Amino acid sequence: MRKLMNVKTALLFGLVVAGLSMFGTVNKVEARPNFKNIWAETYPNSPMLIAKKCGICHPGKSKKEKSDYGEAVFEALGKKRKATDKEVIVKALKAAEAKPTSVEGKTYGDFIKADEMTPTKKSE
């Protein structure tokens, strides 16, 4: 009888652990919101976004590589670089929009409105 009780206890414990592990394996969630989606909401119907996607801010293969516009957004985020609040990100996008580019007399906002990629100092 005691042996049967240990088997039942072990089986019950195994089922509980299996059940809890199913709830523990929830789909991965990105720590940061999707900047691309917030950018698309801020600048709707942008063919540049459709063509370049993340390349607007990250022209290379690595997400660590940033364009000059990406750097301007990064600077505008300031200490909130891992921001998750949509309002903070939109403010950073708008702040970067007002910053001057390497083309004299033009801001990043001018290029966004013209639906052109912003120039980078590295490519000149």
Image: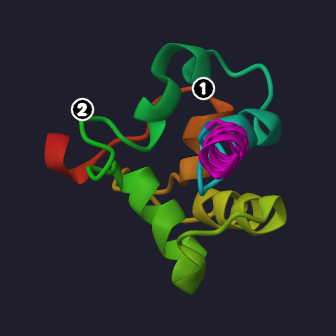
Does any portion of residue 61 appear in the rendered image? yes
The residue located at (51%, 52%) in the rendering is: 106
Q: In which quarter of the image is the N terminus?
A: top right
Out of 61 and 43, give the one closest to the viewer.
Answer: 61
Q: Type of residue at label 2?
A: Lys
The stretch drawn in magenta includes residue 7:
yes
Residue 97 position in % (x across, y down): 63, 56
Q: Quadrant of the C terminus?
A: top left
Q: How many marks?
A: 2
Q: Type of residue at label 1?
A: Asp
- The residue that disc 1 covers is 115
Relative horizontal placement of residue 65, taking residue 109 as reference (left or right): left
The colour scheme of the drawn protein is rainbow
The residue located at (51%, 25%) in the rendering is: 53
| Highlighted range, magenta | 1-27
Q: What element carries label 1?
A: loop
The residue located at (65%, 39%) in the rendering is: 11
Relative horizontal placement of residue 73, taking residue 64 as reference (left or right): right
Q: Chief secondary structure of the magenta span?
A: helix
- The residue that disc 2 covers is 61
Q: Which mark is residue 66?
A: none
